[in-house]
Amino acid sequence: LSNTFTAGIIETAEENTSHFLEDVLDGLSQHPKHLQSKYFYDQRGDRLFQEIMTLPEYYLTRCEMDIFKHKTTDIADGIRADQTPFDLIELGAGDASKSMYLLRYLNEQNVDFTYMPIDISGNILSILDKKLKENIPDLDIQCLEGEYFEMLHKAAQLSSRRKVILFLGSNIGNMELDEAYQFCLELRKNLNKGDVVMIGFDLKKEPNTILNAYNDSKGVTASFNLNLLERINKELNADFIVDQFEHYETYDPLTGACRSYLISLQEQKVTVRDKTFHFDANEPIYMEVSQKFSDEDIENMAAKSGFQFVHNIKDNKEWFMDAFWTA
Ligand code: AVI
């Protein structure tokens, strides 16, 4: 790809595997046992997540899509602020299916901006680059392949224009609250006064609506979680008997934490490389948090990490919110 900046220190496949192994051994040695949800996304995991996004119970994607489709002008107003040219940087851009609406609108309005999608997957970026060139031929695009903060530094070296950061899809919800706060703090430190961030938050709502989104009737979310055990078997030479684990989801309306677990259905031993782990019957492995927020939680997050509130946009049902803050 001619217009992709690739970090010189992208990890080799062996280095990736050794981090994965370290994290799995470390997580299974803890009490309670824990596996990190960032490892859900191998090829099958990607496919299962695509399927989740189309499920009737999984409302998040449709809600944020509703914002991008029907409130494009509001978004553009939020990010254009002083009308100066800017770089539109999307963290974890994926296939940019939501931001495409915004890119098309800004392009039609002859707004002066460069789109800079950041993703760890070079493969996804080349698909995205091709798709955007077909759909919006005169879009100015610069792909950045690597880790978020490393590539934000790179973007600042490549251009001194105002920055607008998109972090969509409630990806922030997959961090524990303190991690999310540290992330926002780090983000703010990497920005200049007047730069804008747009972050997608899933809102606290009727608890069963949330629980069902992560406990779908077809069992796709269960397969999505269990797939991590299959991945560990394949890539780390482990011997999980996947049928001996069951997906269990909880939502706590007090804290807004929706958490998934895999429960060991019997007492058993699992070996990963040369280490053996003992599971009691009914022992959980904690897999993922999908944090839900109130308007007030979001205001506090902005204030605590040093951002100023600009404005909020909600979907028609008021289930999801994109928040605009300025550094
Ligand atoms: C990617 N992330 C925002 C999803 C979520 O809603 O927490 C991942 C997911 N886990 C289960 N279903 C979807």
Image (spheres, rainbow, N blue to C red):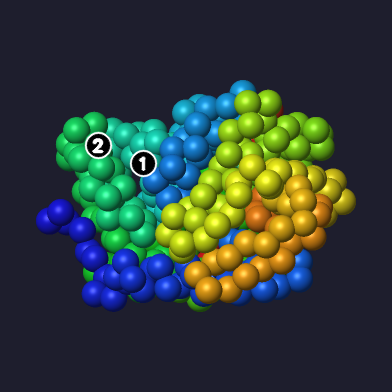
Residue 219, percent from left and from top: 63, 31
Label ID, residue 131:
2
How many residues crowd around disc 1 within 10 Å: few (fewer than 14), some, or many (20 or more)?
some
Which of 203 and 85 lies nearest the eye of the viewer? 203
**Secondary structure beneath label 1:** loop
Instruction: Say what amino acid the circle numbered 1 marks.
Output: Asp
**Secondary structure beneath label 2:** helix
Q: Note whether residue 316 is visible.
A: no
For this orientation, the residue located farthest to the left is 2
- Please give the residue where the numbered disc 1 appears in the rendered image: 95
Q: Indicate whether 60 appears above or below 324.
A: above
Q: Quadrant of residue 240?
A: bottom right
Residue 97, percent from left and from top: 40, 36
Q: Quadrant of residue 239?
A: bottom right
Q: Indicate whether 149 appears above or below 315.
A: below
Q: Quadrant of residue 85?
A: bottom left
Cβ atoms under marks 1 and 2 closer than 8 Å = yes
Instruction: Say what amino acid the circle numbered 2 marks.
Output: Lys
Q: How many marks?
A: 2
Label ID, residue 227:
none
Residue shown at 36% from the left, 73% from the top = 15
Residue 105, percent from left and from top: 35, 34
Q: Which quadrant of the rendered structure holds the N terminus? A: bottom left
